[in-house]
Image: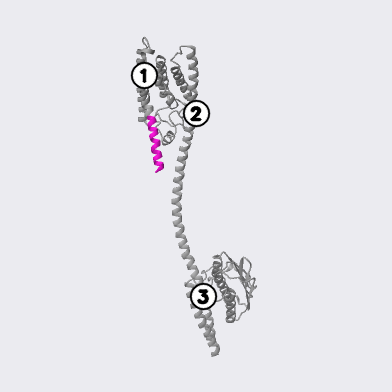
Amino acid sequence: MGETMTAAKATTVEERWQQFFRWGPYGLLALATVLAAGAADLIMDGSEPVTAAVLVVAALVLQAGWEFLRRRAVADGTTLPSAASATAASATPAPAGVGADDSTPQLIPGAPGTASLCYFVLRTAVAFVLTWLNPFFSVYACIGFFDAPQLLPRRLARAGLLCTAVIMAGAQSGGLPPAALVNWFAFGGLFALNACLAMVFSHLGTKEAEKAAERATTITELARTNARLQEALSENAALQAQLLLQAREAGVADERRRLAAEIHDTIAQGLTGIIAQLQVVTVTPDPGIARVHVQRAADLARHSLGEARRSVQNLSPVALEHDSLPEALEKTVATWSERTGIATRFTVTGTHEPLHDEVSATLLRIAQEALANAERHSGASRAGVTLSYMGDEITLDVRDDGHGFDPSRVPARSTTADGSGGFGLDGMRSRAERLAGCVTVEAAPGEGTAISARVPLVHHG
């Protein structure tokens, strides 16, 4: 709203100056003629009034001719005022500057040029002669102080101002030519005064015009910057919408991976254990041993069902419901060792600290997966699980003395015909990476396997 009012004000000031340059010469000539006619009997004699009347008519004809040329310039659409001119004009009157150029607002269409130069020279000559005949015609001559910078090229503007200063000094000192030595001294002093004032105001006007042009340039640049900013904001809005969509899709994909890993770590492992127990039942002739394995299979089924439900609800593993991570790992290792017959030792090093639930759940799931892999693939007779508190991180190591493997030749998840690619190593790595951790595997054929998971030590919040 404020910018609109400023722009309207600037346009009004420019229009007023244009109206002054259009009608001002007529008005000043009329006023000068009236004053000169009133004092004609005291100042003029002989044929001077007739000569003055002829020159007044000549001035009118000259002004009408210049107005015709100016209108034609407007009709041709050449050198019309611009928005930048309007801004500069709001702070700079017509005398601003010493010649029209890029930093001076153009308030007279068609100027500067050959036509405007001829018009100014002829008008100044007529004003000089009229002032010579009657000093009151200096009222008409003073228009040169206002439009010389607009009508003349830059290099001639000062000369035009000095010529106007000569006419004004002659009128103010008693008329041209000075009648006595005192009048000559007065003429010299008044000329110096008029010339200095014209030059000072011209210089100040030039500086103000330059500042106005800089402000106009700055406003234009700000408008461009605002346009670019608006475009950037529109692009950012579109990008944000796209990022939200991608984040939503990523969240869905991440939740699918979590559920897949949880199902693998609960239902799949539980079913594997149940199948192993039932296979023993099918081959053993001893009813007592069969009952033990059937009971184990039933316990595994109940445990797996509970874990599956908790996984779907994104809850912590049941083993962590009442126990800390070291206690849950110790029970998990003991149960796994009893069920598989693989001698396993669990060790805790460092100072025990309470952990965030997500850290505990992640490390427990990694330990369960590593032990399940050792059971299915390693053929180990011994294994070891170590939980280490190491200041700013916590490490879980699972080792076995099995036949090992080549990590570089592990099949990718879901690529093998029998599904042996599984979620094993990929699942463990994904779990650790969600906590800004990592999983490393050290293995070689015939040399066993060591899996190490490292995550930042995040305390329970």
Amino acid marked by disc 1 = Leu
Amino acid marked by disc 2 = His
Dot 3 lies on which element? Answer: helix
* Closest to the observer, 15 or 281: 15
- Residue beneath disc 1: 35
Quadrant location of the C terminus in the rendered image: bottom right
- Can residue 155 be seen here? no
Q: How far, Cα to Cα, is label 2 from label 3?
A: 89 Å
Classify residue 90 as left or right of residue 287.
left
- Residue beneath disc 2: 203
Q: Which residues are magenta?
A: 1-18
Q: Earlier in the sequence, mark 1 or mark 2?
A: 1
- Can residue 22 be seen here? yes
Which residue is drawn at the image coordinates 37% and 20% (left, top)? Answer: 32
Q: Earlier in the sequence, mark 1 or mark 3?
A: 1
- Residue beneath disc 3: 266
Dot 2 lies on which element? Answer: helix
Percent from the top left, x then y, of residue 221? 47, 41
Percent from the top left, x then y, of residue 38? 35, 16
In the rendered structure, find residue 346 and report the number of the disc placed on it. Answer: none
Check disc 1: other Cα within 10 Å, few if <14, some if 14-19, many if 20+: some
Q: Earlier in the sequence, mark 2 or mark 3?
A: 2
